[in-house]
Amino acid sequence: VGLHSLSMSKFTLILTSLNLQVLDKCKIFSSVSLLVFITFSVRSQDIRNTVGNIPMEWYKDYPHIGYDLDGKKLFKPIRNKDELDEFLDKMENPDYWRTVQDKMTGADIRLSDEQVDLVHRLQQGKFGDVNFNEYEPAIDFFSNEVMIHPVTNRPQDKRSFIPSLIEKEKVGKLVHAIKMGWIKPRRPKETTPQYYDLWAKEDPNSILGRHKMHVPAPKMKLPGHEESYNPPPEYLMSEEERLAWEQQDPEDRKLSFLPQKFACLRAVPAYSRFIHERFERCLDLYLCPRQRKMRVNVNPEDLIPKLPKPKDLQPFPTTQSLVYRGHSSLVRSISVSPSGQWLVSGSDDCTVRFWEVSTARCLKTVEVGGAVKGVAWNPNPSICLVAVSYDDTVVLLNPGLGDRLVCTASDQLISSYEEPEEVKDQLVQWAVAEGEGHEQGHRLILKHPKAVRQVTWHGKGDYLACVMPDNGSSLQVVIHQVSKRRTQNPFRKNKGLVQCVSFHPIRPYFFVATQRYVRVYNLIKQELTKKLMANCKWISSMAIHPGGDNVICGSYDCRLAWFDLDLSTKPYKVLRHHKKALRSVAYHRHYPLFASGSDDGSVIVCHGMVYNDLLQNPLIVPVKVLKGHTITHDLGVLDVTFHPTQPWVFSSGSDGTVRLFT
Amino acid sequence: MGGLQKKKYESGSATNYISRNKARKKLSLSLADFRRLCILKGIYPHEPKHKKKVNKGSTAPRTFYLLKDIRFLLHEPIVGKFREYKIFVRKLRKAYGKAEWSGVQRMKENKPAYKLDHIIKERYPTFIDAVRDVDDALSMCFLFSTFARTGKCHVQTIQLCRRLGVEWMNYIITSRSLRKVFLSIKGIYYQAEVLGQTITWIIPYQFAHDHPTDVDYRVMATFTELYTTLLGFVNFRLYQTLNLVYPPKLDGQGEFSLKSECEEDYALESESYSEKLAALSASLARTVPSVEDEEAELDHFPAEGVKKKKKNLEQNKQKKLFEGLKFFLNREVPRESLAFVIRCFGGEVSWDKSLCIGSTYDETDETITHHIVDRPTIDKQYINRYYIQPQWVYDCVNGKILLPVEEYFLGVTLPPHLSPFVEESEGDYVPPEKLKLLALQKGEKPPEEDEEEEEEEEDDEDDEEEDDQSEDEDEAEDEASLAEMEEKRAQGKSLSVKVTPGKVKPENRMRTEQEEKAEEKRLAIMMMKKREKYLYDKIMFGKKRHVREANKLAAKRKAHDDANKPDKKKKKKKC
């Protein structure tokens, strides 16, 4: 292989590349596998293989490696070097590193010094020619200096000498147009706007349809005294007000500025938020959604319903006239004798006291074995008996007050009882009081399986109903017959927690109030006749109108519901007069009055007129708020009862007193 | 029966409204252009009655426009102008980029401009409509006219605003329609009655503005564009009604006298005329030579009653408040405002020659009656004139009478300056100064004691109010007394029983009657329906708050007076 050290400018010959695979034994090339293109001069081609620039591995399996100029096969040189020879060669031959194999001929070539140098230079990215200077000084061909000779020697066009005909024609046209007055010089532009009488022909009917929906923007609020530069002293903010103002959110502030006082007009500074305020006004004008709002312009007095004057609805209790003191704990329950002469009260201090109504004297104190939950005077005037319930016991007491004949008669009534022949198993144990108890007035003792909360008499005075609230139990209400000493459980099953029960004053109906409903049962037919929905969370008490067609229910959620049984099962009216839970409600026997006592310590007396005419709805007017009880342990009035004949109301409270309002 | 099932949100209010973004897309405008269009055409969002229905069930906060409004915008020719302008800007930018300066020049000359005349006519079909809405326009124009001529907006706009403002003020002076002025800490409020419409505007004090960064001046500029057009047309028409020349010209006779030597010290030749106009010291030229203020006697009908006549008389009197008075303004007082106010009420006004163009007489003039000064003392004082502080002028205008000048002398602590816009209704707090002014207006001369009496009266009122509130407390008291009696009784049982001659309790019949009525009311309130009760409570709450605020102010005033009384007495003694 003849190799030339050619200058790189001549390198542009068509290069037939000879892939010189640098043998890996070669030290300098060992890390880099590269293809070196080496050119051959035409002269050296006589030895050359004629196969051309093809991958030489095509001849891998043949004995020859190509063809010479004459078309004869060029045979591969015999290479019988094995690994060991190779190794020895590598070790011994000092030129091993510059020996490469020519793939075209298969011969080993030892690169000359110039060739090695060339390879080095190419590797470093330099020009192959040593003598080539790549940084020769540049010579500007064109420069700013005008030379005497033109760059090109092209002669000028003819058209650059003669005037243009087309232009002449155009100018002529323009001149003609100016002469004729078709073209006028441009008028100077008006910079100031021109105003004229815009509303010269104003037509008020030309208002567009959309103006029906037009909501004109409200005018800005006019300033008050506080905005003055020299306001009256009361409009200036005190120190605390100023601090509070500063701590408020700018949106929450009532005034958007701090009122200030200046001694003279000269001292008034510029208002820093002036531009802001105008800008906010602009934003309001175009961004703020507008809506027509009807302002309620009602005289508040007109909203108050017109009711008959309480004066015209007299009589009703108006003032507190007597206080019955003696109990040391809450008075849970009170009851008035049918004659209206005596009052009985049961308290948590385990006593039952009998009072004379007109003098507030405590006539008798009976101690019982537990906190008294309920007392009830027998409504039959010919019997003098009081039912008292405490714990799981109901005691029938004979107070021995009033007409002695009546007292003895009622004693006889109890003692005249004869044991029936066949003894049935009773739910309740009946026992006759003896000894000390008898002297105190105890007559009959009824032991119940559960704690008794309420006792109530039937109007005739023979039947007595007791409530033993217990959720889910079948035994919550029992009815006793005193004359026969018999007890019955009227309901096979009780739904819900029974709160209170009541007998219908005339007909054989029985009212059972559970938490949310009042059920009315017909005792003769033994069926449910009505279920009243009270619309409240928890009924606390119930009272039946003496006419029997109206019921009121007090509830722990401050409501009092009036039911008209003929009208509907929903309340005819719900009154929210009290601020706290209602504890008890009561009707007057004769007068159209009802009262409610509540935890807020007040008794509200209302006029509740029921008309005989079925078409006329009951009239309900609150007539008096009676206050007297003090609130202790968050409890106020616990029980209210009306006097049987007079328009008086008794109330017992948690402060241990019973009060009479007349 | 039957038919197709109705789909939701395809009829009714959902189709009457359109959200902003949809409206913008419908008009195919950029947000900035849409905003501009809305401002110019006076389109504003509407709050639908049932927002959820309109919003197609969603509760996202959205602003809604009336679909009709947006449709109405579709045919607005100005939208085309907006597009033209957009193209112009694009072309100009391109020409700049290519450095085609002649092209830039040409394009600038042919810059598309639009007029808002038709929009004004459309928004305000009648002249009265326009006058009614001129409040904001005036405030804005006066604000812009105080801007520096560099920076925030075009100089032409500022000049135009100034010109229109001066025109307006000149009109107000000539028509003498100013009614109220108020010096607030924000600026000076003016209220005028033009063609039966009350118009209020505010002018900031003459200081350089500290331009805030969080204000979008483009919005303000768009509004100003509209407002200047509106105000120009309104001014033109107003000048016509008074037979004045528009654009305003100074009265011929006045012009000669005004030509003084020092004119060129102030302004360029071109600006001197407008400056002279702005000085507000000369009257304007009329198209028809005016007959000296011969006011046509209005026919009055008996049906209108004496009240109206009286009011008219009062107004005429107010218009001539400063007639015959000659004012001289010292250099530290706000010249423009004072000159405006004084001339509006028929006074003559002048100032130092070196202060401003257009002064009519010198300080040495012997006929000057009032010299307005805002400094503690002045060196050279003339005997035959009052030296007073500027607040006197404003208070006189608001009081509609010439107030006694003693309280406004130099170095004197000024009486409070009250807002003339507050009209106290019953139950509101009335500052004592206002009461004094009312008394003065009636022609009474209130002596000092009067004040105290008034205070006492106020106290009485307070007591009554307290009574109303404290009825509940009274009951509680009764109860307490009852309890006490009971206690006594109980004690009496244990101790010796004693019978003392009872006292006849004086029965206050009025009182019991009132109490009865109050209780009746309370019981009736208990029977109110829930909804009505809520409304009633709300109204009563508002009323009570009102009373509370008034009481608070009164108490504050009383405390202040009590604190200052000893000082006053001392001063009096010294005197």
Image (cartoon, grey):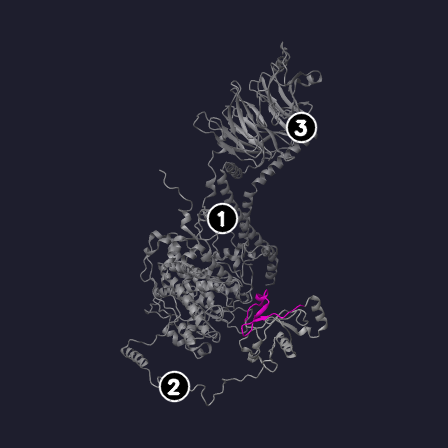
Magenta highlight on residue A66: yes
Disc on res. B59:
1
Can you give x and y, in whole percent of width and height, for residue B348 in the image?
Answer: 43, 69
- A347 or A238, which is in the foreground? A347
- Foreground: A533 or A12? A12
| Residue A15, image x, y percentages | 55, 75
Q: Amino acid at mark 2?
A: Gln
When asked about the image quadrant of residue A112, the answer is bottom right
Near mark 3 (Cα within 10 A), the count class, few <14, some 14-19 or many ≥20, is many
Residue at 56 percent of width and 63 percent of height: A262
Q: Amino acid at mark 1?
A: Thr
SS assignment at label 1 = loop
Whole-Å distance between the Cαs marked 2 and 1? 81 Å
Q: Residues within 10 Å of mark 1 (few under 14, many from 20)?
A: few
Asked whether the residues under the numbered discs 2 and 3 touch, taking CB atoms below 8 Å apart as contact, a structural biologist would say: no
Quadrant containing the N terminus of chain A in the rendered view = bottom right
Q: Residue B262: name its quadrant.
A: bottom left
Task: Report the Cα–Cα distance between label 2 and label 3.
Answer: 136 Å
Q: Is residue B397 visible?
A: yes
Residue at 57% from the left image edge and 21% from the top image edge: A491
Q: Which mark is residue A235?
A: none
Which segment is the magenta one?
A51-80
